[in-house]
């Protein structure tokens, strides 16, 4: 086969490949436009604030409502919920584990007076031995 014929066939093949690729590009661009339209119409939830609980965070508000049924009658849980905290969100804000808060509340481990005071500032839950059985001075 002459060299010129080989080049014509190669050009024809590449032309078809380009047309196919252009059609695929158009398909993906259309899919992207549809997705952008959907995302623009979808309501967005605010991410939790790094500076603490603002009370406007819809996700955290739902968690607080859910945790409201847990520990009914427990003044600590009531104080958490009244301040729009869950035990986990308060622990994150304080830089401690939620297990530490739970165990300190039940008297399994001790809690520093400084941490109890920070909890009182955020939730109104008094930093006393009545509330924290193993409160350290």
Image: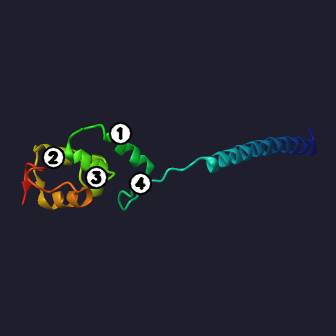
- Which callout, 3 or 4, points at the residue further toward the start of the chain? 4
Q: Position of residue 53 (x, y in %)?
A: 36, 56
- Whether pointer 1 and pointer 4 mark residues with C-beta atoms closer than 8 Å, the reply is no
Local packing at callout 4 (Cα closer than 10 Å; few below 14, some 14-19, many 20+) is some
- Which callout, 3 or 1, points at the residue further toward the start of the chain? 1
Q: Is residue 94 above or below residue 41?
A: below
- Which callout, 1 or 4, points at the residue further toward the start of the chain? 4
Residue annotated with mark 1: 66
Residue annotated with mark 3: 90
Residue annotated with mark 2: 105
Q: Foreground: 29 or 120?
A: 120
Q: CA distance from mark 3 to mark 1?
A: 15 Å
- Which callout, 3 or 2, points at the residue further toward the start of the chain? 3
Q: CA distance from mark 3 to mark 2?
A: 13 Å
On residue 22, the disc is none
Name the element at disc 2.
helix
On residue 48, the disc is 4
**Residue drawn at point x = 40 percent, y = 58 percent:** 49
- Which callout, 2 or 4, points at the residue further toward the start of the chain? 4
Using the rendered view, name the quadrant where residue 56 is placed: bottom left
């Amino acid at each position: 086969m002459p060299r010129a014929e080989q080049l014509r066939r190669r050009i024809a093949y590449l032309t078809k490949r380009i047309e196919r690729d252009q059609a695929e590009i158009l398909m993906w661009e259309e899919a992207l436009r549809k997705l952008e339209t959907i995302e623009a119409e979808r309501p967005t939830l605010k991410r939790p604030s790094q500076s603490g609980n603002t009370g406007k965070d819809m996700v955290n508000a739902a968690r607080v409502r859910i945790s409201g049924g847990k520990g009914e009658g427990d003044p600590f849980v009531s104080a958490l919920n009244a301040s729009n905290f869950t035990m986990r969100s308060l622990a994150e804000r304080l830089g401690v584990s939620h297990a530490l808060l739970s165990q300190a509340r039940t008297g399994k481990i001790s809690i520093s007076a400084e941490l109890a005071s920070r909890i009182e500032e955020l939730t109104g839950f008094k930093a006393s031995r009545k509330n924290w059985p193993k409160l350290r001075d």
